[in-house]
Amino acid sequence: MSMLTPPGMGGQYRITGDKYPRMRRNRGRRRIVLAVVASVAALAMIGWGTLQLIDVFTGGGDEASAAGPATDCTTSPSPSARPNKALPKPGQITVNVLNATPRAGLAKNTAEELKKRGFKIGEVGNATKAYDKKVAGPGIVLGAKTAADAALPVLATQLTGAELKTDTRTKPAEVDLILGTAFKTLKPKAQADKALTTLAAPTPPPSATKKDC
């Protein structure tokens, strides 16, 4: 029996020639390794995708959280109602009281009341043709352009609903009070004094206001 004869064959079969049986590698182990690698890669992709979703919904992760939302936090000054300017006192203002209504004695009575309140009285009479019976409201306070922030608003504190207008005159301390159809009486003195005090109060400087961030 040849030494190449497998045991138990009893010499019945022989292996001859130069070809020998070869042992095959275990393919099951390779498949396991590939499966493990694929699983790891899949888990890595899932983890990366999860992080991307977190960034999207949280606004950029830790850096975005630390920096906060991109809002405009610039400061802006609060508006001032009126520039600080010394207003004239009633005794420094000369008022021409003009009646634009058909009611007699209206200008005279109003002028007397304004005089009691400290105003100087100039001309008292009927309104000019440009305004006579053409003023539907309580009245018009008319003066120079330079009086727009001075004598005009001071006199306007005495009449509710007064309309302020300017013309080409050059005397800022001379103002016309043109009484209109809706005029009944001057504002009560207590209310007029309060309005005058409020008008003369110094306006605080504009303060910077910061938007919520």
Image: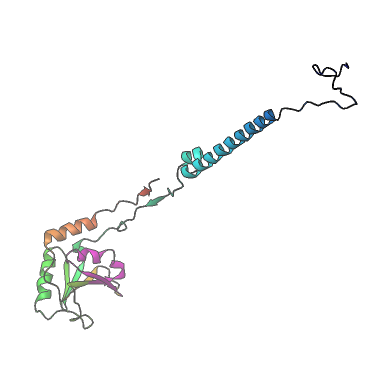
Considering depth in this image, is 120 or 187 the residue closer to the camera? 187
Q: x%, y% of residue 201? A: 24, 54
Q: Quadrant of residue 80?
A: bottom left
Residue lying at the far right of the rendered structure:
17
Instruction: Identify whether 127 is placed above or below 194.
Output: below
Q: Quadrant of residue 69?
A: top left
User: In the image, which residues are magenta?
Assistant: 141-167
State yes or no: residue 164 in magenta: yes
Considering depth in this image, is 194 or 46 the residue closer to the camera? 46
Counting the numbered discs, the total is 0
Residue at point 9% right, 72% down?
109
Q: x%, y% of residue 144? A: 29, 71
Is residue 52 in sight in this rendering? yes
Instruction: Identify whether 144 is placed above or below 69.
Output: below
Q: x%, y% of residue 148? A: 29, 67
Is residue 176 in sight in this rendering? no
